[in-house]
Amino acid sequence: MNAILVGADTLGNIPGLLANQGIGILKHISGRNASHQRKLPGLPKDTDILILFTDFVGHNVMRHFRMLAQEKSIPILACRRSTCALLEGLQQAGLCKENQCDTCPNQTRKKN
């Protein structure tokens, strides 16, 4: 699965978390840089999911990328830029691979 990430200047541990879930990063757009905020004609054709980091993106940038994803029926995941928020969003979207991550809430619930 390939993802486009929009928002955040740096990704920190997010690429590792996504890799553990079988998601590769096709492109990262910070959304803060003026050149990144220019309207793109479309998302790359190999895009499987759009991940928006809401605490680092303006409303106009977010609206533009949502429209691009909706035109191609690409699922959209909006969350804060933290590994916990991203993992929770992946779980709610049904994209969290069970038993792939020791911190997965699904896995801790099964052990109890």
Image: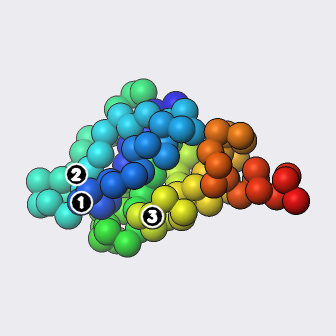
Mark 2, Cα crowd under 10 Å, few <14 / some 14-19 / many 20+, is: few
- Determine the residue positioned at 54% across, 33% down: 22
Residue for point 24% across, 60% down: 9
Q: Residue lying furthest left in this view?
A: 35
Residue 37 image point, x, y percent: 20, 58
Could you say whether the residue bearing mark 2 is in a helix, strand or loop? loop
Distance in Å between CA atoms under marks 2 and 3: 26 Å
Q: Quadrant of residue 66?
A: bottom left
Query: Is 38 positioned to the left or the right of 45 in the image?
Result: left
Separation of residues labelled 1 and 2 (CA atoms)? 18 Å
Name the N-terminal-most of marks 1 and 2. 1
In the displayed structure, 1 sits above or below 64; it is above
- Please tell me how crowded label 3 is: few (under 14), some (14-19), or many (20+) other residues with Cα within 10 Å: some
Mark 1 nearby-residue class (10 Å; few <14, some 14–19, many ≥20): some
Indicate the amino acid at tag 2.
Lys
**Which of 16/24 is in front?**
16
Q: Find disc 3 in the rendering and name its residue.
A: 82
Find the residue positioned furthest to the top: 46
**Circle 2 residue:** 39
Occupied quadrant, residue 20: top right
Residue 39 location, x and y as percent? 22, 51
Q: Which of 24 and 43 lies nearest the eye of the viewer?
A: 24
Query: Looking at numbered disc 3 in the image, what kind of residue is underneath it?
Result: Ser
Residue 52, labelled with which disc? none
Residue that label 1 marks? 9
Q: Is residue 76 left or right of residue 14?
A: right
From this viewpoint, is residue 69 visible?
no
Question: Residues at badges 2 and 3 in contact (C-beta under 8 Å)?
Answer: no
Q: Earlier in the sequence, mark 2 or mark 3?
A: 2
SS at mark 1 in the image: loop
